Image (cartoon, rainbow, N blue to C red):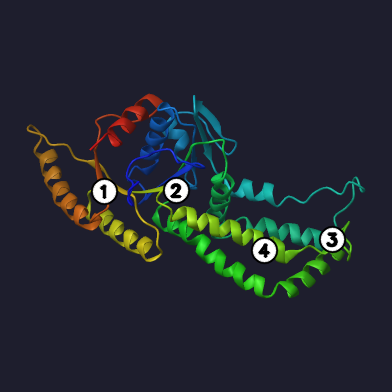
Amino acid sequence: MPANRDKPAQAASGPLFHFFSGKGGVGKTTLAAATAVHLARSGLKVLITSTDPAHSLSDVFDRDIGHQGAHIEENLHALEVDSSKRWAEATVTPDDPSGVGRKRGRVERAMTDAMKMLGDAPGVDEFISLELLLETMTSDVYDTVVFDTAPTGHTLRLLLLPEMLDGWLGRMLSVRKQLSRVGSVLKRLLPGGSAGEEPDLGANLMDARDRILQARDLITDTERTLFALVTIPEAMSVLETSRTMQQLGEHGIPVSVVIGNQVQPTSDTCEHCQSRRTIHEREMEHLAQVCGEVPLRLVESKPYVIRGPDALAKLGRELWRER
């Protein structure tokens, strides 16, 4: 495959990942959903997941999806990640099998409350999204995972999170002896623990670091990851697209395709429409310069609402047709 693969395909081993990002309101959720339906109807098993806190998948598919997910149609499953609920599930305190009705101790209550507070901290959305990426990275359940990401700034934090965590884990490993002693103290404090149950924090950190490195390699692997940057032919959006491509390039994350969405069609009868078309043509020229070697796909705005699998499938065929 070429370095800048601009069409969805099936990976030789493990699922392919498709990231859709861009400014809010440029139509990335609709294009991500259209791609998911298009791939599913071509015979691939597809998961589309929204990591944007302002979920729109339910709206575009015209049905409730939510945190538990929903089966949309054959080969297609959708999931709206609720970071607060997922964090709560991941940090729930296990019951003590030997003490039914036992009251939690002060230390345990404090730790549980602290973990709950962390669930609302900045960056948790990106962390939970990375967890989902790690979960599906080696899965054989799906052929393709489509990520409808949060607006550009959040997506950049998600994509750079493996790099940040790798540095953090590296420093953690350098002091793992001290951490092991801390872990031993915590085990003695928590109910049911003992000093003899010291966890191998060094091994756990090494395992975590290996998984983070795999995620970083995956994000930068153009054979398995297609990163689509969605924009519209308006000056502010094109400028943000230019900045985003530069930032991603500085961290070795290649953009596979830029999608210029909501392009004004030509008109022989509407003066306003033709004026808008002239503006869009100028910005499309600018966008083509910004893209350089990166493929650019254009999608004209539609005089109807794109909602539901059939309308999305039609858009998907238009978006990914041979150029």
Tell us which disc is closer to us: 1 or 2.
1
Residue 250, position as x, y percentages in the image = 37, 66
Label 2 is placed on what type of residue? Thr
The span from disc 2 to disc 3 (Cα, nearest Å) is 38 Å
Residue occupying image coordinates x 60% and y 70%? 170
Q: For mark 2, what is the residue?
A: 149
The residue that disc 3 covers is 190
Rounded to the nearest whole Å, what is the CA distance between mark 1 and mark 3? 56 Å
Which one is earlier in the sequence, the residue at label 1 or at label 3? 3
Mark toward the viewer: 1 or 3? 1
Pointer 1 or 2: first along the chain: 2
Q: Height in image: 135 above or below 124?
A: above
Give amino acid for label 4: Leu
Q: Earlier in the sequence, mark 2 or mark 4?
A: 2
Alpha carbon distance from label 2 to label 4 = 28 Å
Q: Nearer the viewer, mark 2 or mark 4?
A: 4
Q: What residue type is labelled 3?
A: Leu
Cβ–Cβ under 8 Å for marks 2 and 4: no
Horizontal arrangement in the rendering, residue 266 relative to residue 209 (left or right) = left
Residue 295, numbered label: 1
Task: Name the one closer to the observer, 183 or 110.
Answer: 183
Of marks 1 and 4, which one's residue comes earlier in the chain?
Answer: 4
The residue under label 4 is 205
Helix, strand or loop at mark 4: helix
Q: Which amino acid does label 1 sit on?
A: Pro
Q: Residues within 10 Å of mark 4 (few under 14, many from 20)?
A: some
Q: In which quarter of the image is residue 247?
A: bottom left
Q: Earlier in the sequence, mark 4 or mark 3?
A: 3
